[in-house]
Amino acid sequence: MDKERNSEQERVNTIVDKIKNAFQKAQHEYYKARTERSSVEKNYVQNAKINTFEVDDQMETNAEVQQQKQLVAKNVETEKILKRQIQLLSNLKNSPYFGRIDIHENGETSPEVLYIGTSSFNDEQGNFLIYDWRAPISSIYYNGTLGTVSYTTPMGKQEAQLLKKRQFRIKDGKITNMFDTNETVGDELLQEMLGAQSDEYMKNIVATIQKEQNDIIRDTTHDLLIVQGVAGSGKTSAILQRIAFLLYHSRSDLNAEQIVLFSPNLLFSHYISEVLPSLGERNMRQVTLTEFFAQRFEGLTVETLFDKFEQKDSSAINSANLIKEDSTFMHKVKEYVENLDNSQLFFNDLILVDQVIFSNSEIRSLYDKLPLAQPHHLRHFELKNVLIKELKRKIKDELTAPWVLKKIDALTEEEYHSLLGDYKRGRFEDIEAEISYISNKIVSTKFEPIYEAIYNNYFIDIYRQYSDFLGKILPDDVINFNNELEYHRIRLEDCAPALYLRDQLTGEGQNHSIQHLFIDEMQDYSLAQIYYLHTAFPTAHLTLLGDSEQALFHEIQEPQFLMTALKQTINPKKTRMIELNKSYRSTFEITSFMKALLPDGEKIQAFTRSGPLPKLVLTNDNETDIISKLLLETQALLNKNETVAIITKDFKTCQKLLRSFKSKDAPTLITNSDRSLPTGLVLLPIYLAKGLEFDAVIAFEVSQNSFSEDTRGILYTICSRAMHDLVLVSTGDVSNLITAIPSELFTIEQNIKFKQK
Ligand SMILES: Nc1ncnc2c1ncn2[C@@H]1O[C@H](COP(=O)(O)OP(=O)(O)OP(=O)(O)O)[C@@H](O)[C@H]1O
């Protein structure tokens, strides 16, 4: 093997040299393109300044400026391509590839040796020195064991003999590890990757993608892909590598702007932000559910999942929530709109400063004139056109109003020219035409807010309409909805049905440009919300990922139940459901402990990476004891780890705990608005830790008072954030969820007597 290793190292050296040459060449071309652009730009500014008094000069200058504008745009495009190439080559320089496959294709005289890396690299003659991990042939590396293998090409299925599969770890151009394997992707490399310390950013996993993850990544045939994966099974990793795959697969008709990922919080968005750039791709759009709704309810504060979690409210409201969160509630919205009489519609006045431009009765009478046979959304579309026409008429009537002439008289020379804009003096037939143009500008600007209001459907009183709907289905809930509105707030569970009501009435609210919609942590979304997102992005393929057992907002559900409910909600043409049961994040010991927390934890397979047993620490319920024990634990963990997180059930617990720390030892409290995590000791509630991972986790605190049956999912989620070490601190009787766990799965810092069950 030594000889083999030497010859592989020689190949790495040769390839790295070639990559470095290509890198330098690309950099040189990039700087050349940039210099060229800036000189064209300079020229362009000068030309734009050329005498523009004479009409002929003006035309000539315009043509030249247009030509130069085009030249600049072309150069900008070239720069973009070169920049991407430089980024790719820079990634390849240090670690050109991670895999090798030797295959013998049917009909070929000799075997072929292929190397696989994060992107492809050719020599000057166009020979592939490295294959992109997303190329059809590279799927053999992820899926195949030695012997006959097949892969899909644009021409159909292709068969080959896989003769050798080799994995590499190459750092700074040196092979640090290399071995042949017959497994899909061997454990040895995975051990090395998973044993590393956590990082501010998630890393790409392309070198060690597992077979079932590969199925998710490379699926292009289903319009709904549902992934139920246990904690740490690589769901988020799979989404990101899937996005990179899709962008490669449909390079000519898909770009990152057409992909949206709904993520659980801002920290998560930051954490995953480097994965796609490390693969030479641009990031997709990311949004949280609250951000998405907030953009659509301008002027209202939308409740966040976190507010909701902190104020777990009375059972009366909860039972209303359950109804509102079901997709049947959305069907009721649709029925309501279909059966709505004109007399039951609510309109707003359209007001400019304090002048009513269109009163609600005027709008209603315009609506009443439209043919009843048409559904509301078509009549609504016509109403908008009628209102705009009316507005134009009002603008025309206003053109000669005395205030307009007064305003023109008061304009400075500069203001007058700025209103003329691209039009220059002398281009109008006579002075009347010029004044009429200026008057139009002034009056239109004044009425602009009304135009915007019509465009944005502000003439519909959507809140009263929704309140009316609620009155029919959940009369007791109307008062709660209206009370929130008084304070300019809207509850999260009202957002999807209220927006759906608006969209049903207006026929708007859909975004057809989005091709792929990803929802991570799907278990935190109600079926009504998922239904709404599906209608709002009607052409998008959906990938939903989550873990029914990491439910923070309700009791945990059977995975199969969640998957079936989702499928019924969306009812797509082609669905695929994939379960991921192997957990990679945590050590074998932590995963075994987490498994025992769940009633059906047996299905979870722990990855065989070893570490210390989870530790249960018992303290008295007094500040001094709690803090001294916590300090002891955090010190020990910080000595061997980069990031240690104290994770609590809710924010109140964080705040109370923080008050007990002396400032010099205090952890950094993470809040809802934080976008990045510092290293060292942090303190945060579980909902902010969603999707994240830490070298060590201290679960604070795990007494029976804090965790009982209905919060099992929360405890499970807290524990599953730990990669290498897990400590659980209890300040009173330990939760039954923990006392029920076999004692060999954890250590106890002090012998206690568990209560008899
Ligand atoms: N094939 C793999 N190769 C290397 N690392 C992997 C692989 N799959 C998962 N991991 C690692 O396991 C950890 C968990 O992955 P990820 O966060 O994607 O899981 P998840 O299922 O989304 O987790 P959760 O639902 O618990 O938030 C990450 O550190 C990820 O890099």
Image: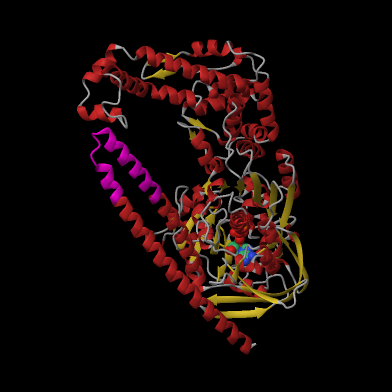
Q: Can you give x and y, in whole percent of width and height, for residue 614 in the image?
A: 61, 66
Residue in the foreground of this view, choosing between 80 and 166: 80
Number of marks in the rendered image:
0
Residue sitting at x 67%, y 46%:
555
Q: Residue at x 37, y 46 (%)?
A: 67
Q: Residue furthest front?
A: 56
Prevalent SS, magenta region: helix
Above or below 186: residue 736:
above
Q: Nearer the viewer, residue 429 or 509?
A: 429
Of residues 165 and 652, the one drawn nearer to the viewer in this rendering? 165
Answer yes or no: is residue 757 visible: no
Q: Which residues are magenta?
A: 43-71
- Picture coordinates of residue 107 (x, y %)? 77, 72
* Depicted 454 relative to depicted 146: above or below: above
Q: How is the image coloured?
A: secondary structure
Residue at position x 41%, y 49% from top?
A: 73
Q: Nearer the viewer, residue 570 or 258?
A: 258
Q: Where 666 falls versus 553 (above or below)?
A: below
Q: Is residue 60 magenta?
A: yes
Residue 348 screen position, x and y as percent = 49, 18
Q: Residue furthest bottom?
A: 3
Task: Indicate yes or no whether the magenta region holds residue 698.
Answer: no
Rendering quadrant holding ligand 1: bottom right
Q: Quadrant of the N terminus?
A: bottom right
In the picture, the quarter occupied by the C terminus is bottom right
Q: Is residue 756 visible?
A: yes
Residue 752 position, x and y percent, is: 63, 64
